[in-house]
Image (cartoon, rainbow, N blue to C red):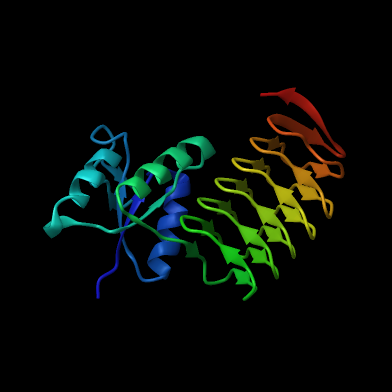
């Protein structure tokens, strides 16, 4: 049986998501709101906008029921995921074959786990998250909906990252730390104290440098 997967978002991030999807046996079809000014991403054609995908979903002979949103911006990714859910799409979760995932991990729909990532026992990953290349999510961590854990991030045990968070590349977070909703942790930071909602924090140790 052919498994078609609609990927919403034709960007660099979308390329990696497409690569994972193809390794898992999907035939990918890109949709991007830049269409028709943008018609291809590498060798993949773009078939239309997100609105075009929803219109196809209402045509039984052209329906693509499986979809994933490959947009790095957390807020836009949330908007598109919620729109697709409202239109009865099956939001797929993709896990790269080289990722190491405990049998006791929960990963919600629409999330992507990239190559070399490790997610250990009793961690919980929410809806529409990105666990990027070689990230380490230790035991009992909670990653809330629509959060992006960037490449080579290390979260020690029991860390909580709130919704729509962004933990920048190479950052480290001490055990039992809570990072609030809508937070951005700058690249290469070391987080040793709790971070409140709606701020940007950066440094080693990380300190709040801006409120949103």
Relative to 155, 192 lies left or right: right
Vertical relation: 15 (above or below) 204: below
Residue 23, given in percent of the width and then of the height, sits at: 42, 69
- In the depicted view, which residue is nearer to us: 145 or 38? 145
Residue 150, given in percent of the width and then of the height, sits at: 63, 48
Residue, x 26% and y 39% (percent of image)? 51
Q: Quadrant of the C terminus?
A: top right
Which residue is farthest left? 61
Residue 24, given in percent of the width and then of the height, sits at: 41, 70
Vertical relation: 162 (above or below) 93: above
- In the depicted view, which residue is nearer to us: 66 or 16? 66
Residue 89, given in percent of the width and then of the height, sits at: 32, 54
- In the depicted view, which residue is nearer to us: 9 or 210? 210
Residue, x 51% and y 36% (percent of image)? 75
Relative to 149, 82 lies left or right: left
Q: Quadrant of the N terminus?
A: bottom left
Vertical relation: 144 (above or below) 37: below
Residue, x 46% and y 55% (percent of image)? 110
Quadrant assignment, res 100: bottom right
Q: How many marks?
A: 0
Relative to 206, 20 lies left or right: left
Residue, x 46% and y 36% (percent of image)? 76
């Amino acid at each position: 049986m052919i498994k078609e997967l609609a990927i919403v978002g034709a960007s660099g991030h979308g390329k990696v998501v497409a690569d994972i999807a193809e390794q898992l046996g999907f035939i990918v079809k890109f949709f991007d709101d830049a269409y028709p000014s943008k018609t291809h991403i590498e060798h993949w054609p773009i078939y239309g906008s997100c609105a075009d995908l929803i219109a196809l979903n209402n045509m039984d002979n052209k329906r693509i029921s499986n979809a994933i949103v490959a947009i790095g911006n957390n807020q836009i990714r949330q908007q598109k995921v919620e729109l697709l859910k409202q239109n009865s799409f099956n939001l797929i979760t993709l896990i790269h074959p080289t990722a190491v995932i405990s049998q006791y991990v929960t990963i919600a729909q629409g999330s992507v786990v990239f190559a070399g990532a490790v997610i250990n026992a009793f961690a919980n990953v929410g809806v529409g998250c990105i666990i990027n290349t070689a990230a380490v999510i230790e035991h009992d961590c909670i990653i809330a909906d629509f959060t992006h854990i960037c490449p080579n991030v290390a979260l020690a045990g029991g860390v909580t990252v709130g919704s729509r968070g962004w933990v920048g590349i190479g950052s480290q977070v001490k055990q039992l730390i809570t990072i609030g909703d809508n937070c951005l942790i700058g690249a290469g930071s070391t987080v040793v104290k709790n971070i409140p909602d709606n701020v940007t924090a950066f440094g080693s140790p990380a300190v709040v440098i801006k409120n949103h």
